Amino acid sequence: MTSGEATREGARTAAAPGGMGREVVARSGLLARGVLYVLVGVLAIRVAFGEGGKEADREGALQELTEKPFGGFLVWAVGIGLVCMMLWRLSEAVFGAAGPDGRKAGKRLAAVARTVFYAVVAFSVLSFAAGSGSGRSGDEQSRDVTAKVLDLPGGPWWVAAAGAAIAIGGIVIAVQAARRTFRKDLAMYGTPAGVRKAVEFLGVTGGVARGAVFAAAGAFVVYAAVRYDPAEAKGLDDTLRAFAQTPAGPWLLVLVAAGLVLFGLFCWALACWRRV
């Protein structure tokens, strides 16, 4: 690391509010998120090869985890890690994120949305760990929510807007990954070039796959609104299985599933080098 790089890195680190506590919750949250993505990706690969006994979604990943040694403890650990993820995003909403533009209104609003999202996910995982979860798959929950919203005044428009937002978000995720915009959030000065290239590979391939899944899921929600049929809305498992029904067959699902595994590994890399 040159003296100039060290100075810039020190300034960026010092500018990040929250101190050691924020760093601990952020890195714990990224580790937990990585576990879920790796497990979902592995389950989806099994589905592609006709070995899928579990659904390739969060519920399936947690069930898979419970079957491992100390599985109950691991599920609780993931749930607590996701609470940490929520707290990190909440701190970004309140105090601002790391980086020169971290206190801008747009960044804070995005952090609020992420806080709500991870609060819901953490509650779901902790409910599963406590044995009080709904027991319903993500696909069933997606259809139920879509049906309820469709019955509201202007329901199809609300559903279509939500689906469009998810799809656009997926496209943005994929484009940002392809452009390697995540590099500005990494503190890897002095890290060997091979390691940096490996992390970039994980970020690009994993991010593109994740974005593709979000975009497809959003498109199905829009289609459900157009058809006024909640059965057309798909959760994560059904969305992933839809990739296998394209002309590319199960190999497209294999590629997307492998990408999700790589994104999980990227989350673990972020737990090491993400500037928080």
Image (cartoon, rainbow, N blue to C red):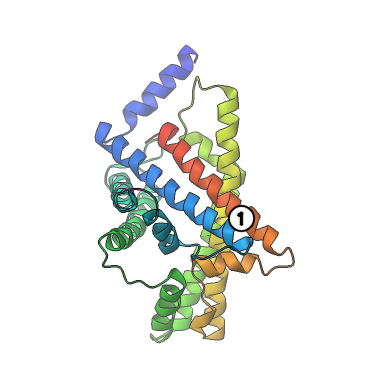
Residue at label 1?
256
Image location of residue 195, percent across then percent down = 56, 28
State the residue lying farthest toward the top: 3
**For the point 39% across and 55% down, which residue is it?**
67
Q: Which quadrant is the C terminus positioned in?
A: top left
State the residue lying farthest toward the right: 247
Image location of residue 154, percent across then percent down = 43, 84
Image quadrant where residue 63 sits: bottom left
**For the point 49% across and 46% down, which residue is it?**
264
Is residue 62 or residue 87 the one in the foreground? Answer: 62
Number of marks in picture = 1
Is residue 43 or residue 113 the one in the foreground? Answer: 43
Image quadrant where residue 109 sits: bottom left
Please tell me whether mark 1 sits on a helix, a strand or a loop: helix
Image location of residue 162, percent across then percent down = 46, 70
**Would residue 171 be visible to someone looking at this image?**
no
Indicate whether 34 appears above or below 11. Answer: below
State left or right for residue 179 relative to residue 38: right
Indicate whether 96 appears above or below 45. Answer: above
Dot 1: within a 10 Å radius of its alpha carbon, few (fewer than 14), some, or many (20 or more) residues? Answer: many
Image location of residue 219, percent across then percent down = 57, 70
Amino acid beneath label 1 = Val
Image quadrant where residue 242 sits: bottom right
**Would residue 22 be visible to someone looking at this image?**
yes
**For the point 27% across and 65% down, which residue is it?**
131
